[in-house]
């Protein structure tokens, strides 16, 4: 289980760790779940950038070796489509997805929908997740799409500096209602870049909430086994 790798060609050290991860621990797993923001940004499946192609090939090789590959959209790469996922033999998972891991019901999310106090972002999310908006956007020439995304990313950095720390974390009440709605599962998500294991007691049920780490300084993954989950850190960059 990984998320928030934010892969891009300009961070070769993290990319090297990622490719080693795919050839090593991931290749020995039953399945690899990527819970969003695999890429720093995604302009469309028709982007023939050689770095993107190298990631696609490495994921495809993992899947060809018999590892089930699951992809969830993040707020950066939600435009990943069927063409990309077919090409690397991945299954696109809806957010949220309720799974069963060795008998433990487990809810998988990217995590951005849990940050419901960030009204500005939630409004933006509704707009860009609209299929009509996406159709229109993907019909633009690739270079123009990349220009628009670059502009949004600059705006986003400026906005983040103005937002309070608490607004960019999950909203406790939203976490509670999501857990209640799904009958008190274990929850695994990323997005906030605040790795931790939280325990929530809701209506008398104890629910674990694992927040996955980003891959900015180094790589890590959450290994889920019959006995439970634990974090494994990869060699630092
Ligand atoms: Mn995110």
Image (tube, grey):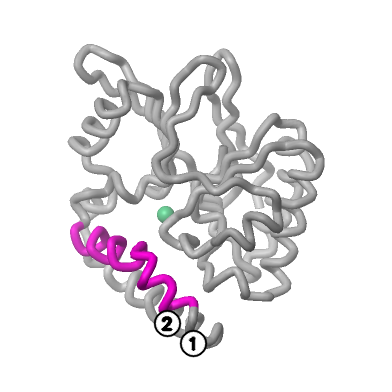
Residue 152, percent from left and from top: 37, 76
Q: Could you tell me which residue is drawn at 56 percent across and 55 percent down? A: 38
Residue 182, percent from left and from top: 32, 27
Q: Is residue 232 left or right of residue 185?
A: right
* Mark 1 CB lies closer than 8 A to ligand 1: no
Q: For numbered disc 2, what is the local secondary structure?
A: helix
The correct choice, above or below, for 123 with respect to 178 in the image is below
Q: Badge 1 is on which residue? A: 144
Q: Could you tell me which residue is drawn at 19 percent across and 16 percent down? A: 203
Disc 2 crowd rating (10 Å Cα; few below 14, some 14-19, many 20+) is: few
The correct choice, above or below, for 180 with respect to 119 in the image is above
Q: Badge 2 is on which residue? A: 148
Residue 140, percent from left and from top: 48, 84
Residue 125 magenta-drawn?
yes
Disc 1 crowd rating (10 Å Cα; few below 14, some 14-19, many 20+) is: few
The residues colored magenta run 119-138
Q: Could you tell me which residue is drawn at 56 percent across and 13 percent down? A: 227
């Amino acid at each position: 289980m990984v998320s928030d790798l934010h892969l891009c060609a300009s961070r070769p050290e993290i990319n090297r760790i990622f490719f080693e991860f795919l050839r090593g621990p991931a290749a020995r797993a039953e399945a690899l779940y990527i819970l969003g923001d695999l890429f720093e940004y995604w302009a469309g499946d028709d982007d023939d950038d050689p770095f993107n192609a190298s990631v696609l090939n490495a994921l495809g090789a993992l899947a060809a070796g018999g590892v089930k590959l699951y992809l969830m959209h993040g707020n950066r790469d939600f435009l990943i489509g069927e063409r990309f996922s077919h090409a690397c033999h991945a299954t696109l998972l809806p957010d949220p997805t309720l799974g069963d891991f060795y008998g433990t019901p487990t809810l998988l999310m990217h995590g951005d929908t849990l940050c419901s106090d960030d009204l500005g972002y939630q409004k933006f999310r509704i707009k860009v997740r609209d299929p009509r908006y996406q159709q229109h956007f993907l019909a633009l020439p690739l270079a123009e799409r990349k220009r628009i995304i670059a502009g949004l990313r600059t705006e986003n950095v400026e906005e983040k500096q103005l937002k309070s720390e608490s607004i960019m974390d999950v909203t406790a009440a939203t976490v509670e209602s999501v857990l209640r709605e799904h009958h008190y599962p274990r929850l695994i998500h990323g997005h906030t870049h605040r790795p931790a294991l939280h325990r929530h007691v809701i209506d008398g049920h104890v629910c674990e909430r694992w927040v996955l780490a980003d891959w900015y300084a180094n790589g890590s993954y959450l290994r889920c086994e019959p006995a439970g989950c634990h974090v494994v850190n990869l060699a630092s960059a």
